[in-house]
Amino acid sequence: MCAVQGIYESSAHYSLLTTHPIRYIARRVETITLKTDTADLFAEAVAQAAAALRHGAVVALPTETVYGLAANALNESCVAKIFEAKDRPSENPIIVHVADETMARDCVAEWPAAAAALAKAFWPGPLSLVLLKAEVIPDNVTAGGETVGVRWPRHPLMQEVIRACRFPLAAPSANVANQVSPTTADHVAAQLDGRIPLIINGGAAEVGIESTVVEVVGDAVRVLRPGMISGEAIAAVCPDGADENETGVLKSPGQLPRHYAPNARLLVLTWADAEDLERQITYSRTPHDRMCVIAHNRIVSGTRFGRVSVFPNDPEAYARALYAELHECDAEGAELIVVEAVPEAAEWQGIADRLARAGG
């Protein structure tokens, strides 16, 4: 049974096991952020996070992809707090994070050879595998479906917290549902301060966008959500493709038409020069000082736009910077974000997917 009933339970029923008791003020929780930039602070943060999770709380934790909002994946009541804190729709499943392959196998009903091959090639890392779920996984983790996504993250703090808890963690992105995912602890606090008790600051996310999600059906696979591990890389390990999903049940997060979206409207365009861009956006009637431009190839210098950012023409560096830039545009009060279309090459598929859904 979950030790804390709801995310706003009185602190008389719950406290962290060390120096930071949780205080609740007017039905809002006081959010504490812990640093990890020394060995002692790292160890303290792991202990605090594990204590909170064992007592049924939700905790924002760093991973190499984006920050996640974690709870005990084996407890339906604890998982429900994730949905409450994020305003997350119940039909959107959550990926389960594990500390090793053994824990992953305990979460699923079968472990085909294709799953073993993909795990060997890409774990720990930004790859989630969707398989038939084991009975121990609550229905709200899988949105009522028969499959569950599992991932072994490579971020050292996330790994240590899971080991300390001795149970897997359900952990979608630590933000309000459908908004831009957080890649820093500050991004988490900007959206979830007062909603969750604890944020662990593990620095900026290394990858910058969410994991690639692959469903494994026997020895065949299908990519449900592209990421920085490309479809080509997946096919090099498991060349057999599965038939399209026809169940109508979401098997992976990140499949809604509009997702990862900033407050500002986002357009993905291709332009020849600054004048061409000006012509294309004239119809928007947005004041230029309320427009932000993100370019990587066709640079628009000397314009009247409120913010112009030039990204590296490299997919890994681009992904690492993308969400942080979208957060900055929102913080500056942008009404329109114009993004130069990225290349169609396989290594850009995950970024193209995020931009398309952000503009959806």
Image (cartoon, rainbow, N blue to C red):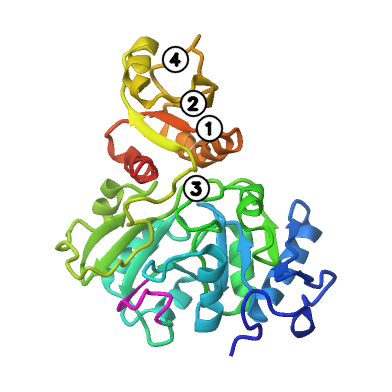
Residue type for callout 4? Val
Residue type for callout 2? Met
Q: Nearer the viewer, mark 3 or mark 2?
A: 2
- Which mark is first along the chain, 4 or 2? 2
SS assignment at label 1: loop
Measure the C-alpha gap from mark 2 to mark 1: 6 Å
The magenta span reads: 139-148
The disc label shown at residue 180, or none: 3
Residue 236: % across, % down: 25, 51
**Would residue 334 be seen by someone viewing this image from the given angle?**
yes
- Which mark is first along the chain, 4 or 1? 4
Judging by the rendered image, the residue that carries numbered circle 1 is 334
- Which mark is first along the chain, 3 or 4? 3
**Would residue 99 be seen by someone viewing this image from the given angle?**
no
Q: Nearer the viewer, mark 1 or mark 4?
A: 1
Judging by the rendered image, the residue that carries numbered circle 2 is 291
The crowding category of the residue bearing disc 1, from other C-alpha atoms within 10 Å (few below 14, some 14 to 19, many at least 20), is many
Measure the C-alpha gap from mark 1 to mark 3: 14 Å
- Which mark is first along the chain, 1 or 2? 2
Indicate the quadrant containing the C terminus: top left, top right, bottom left or bottom right. Answer: top left
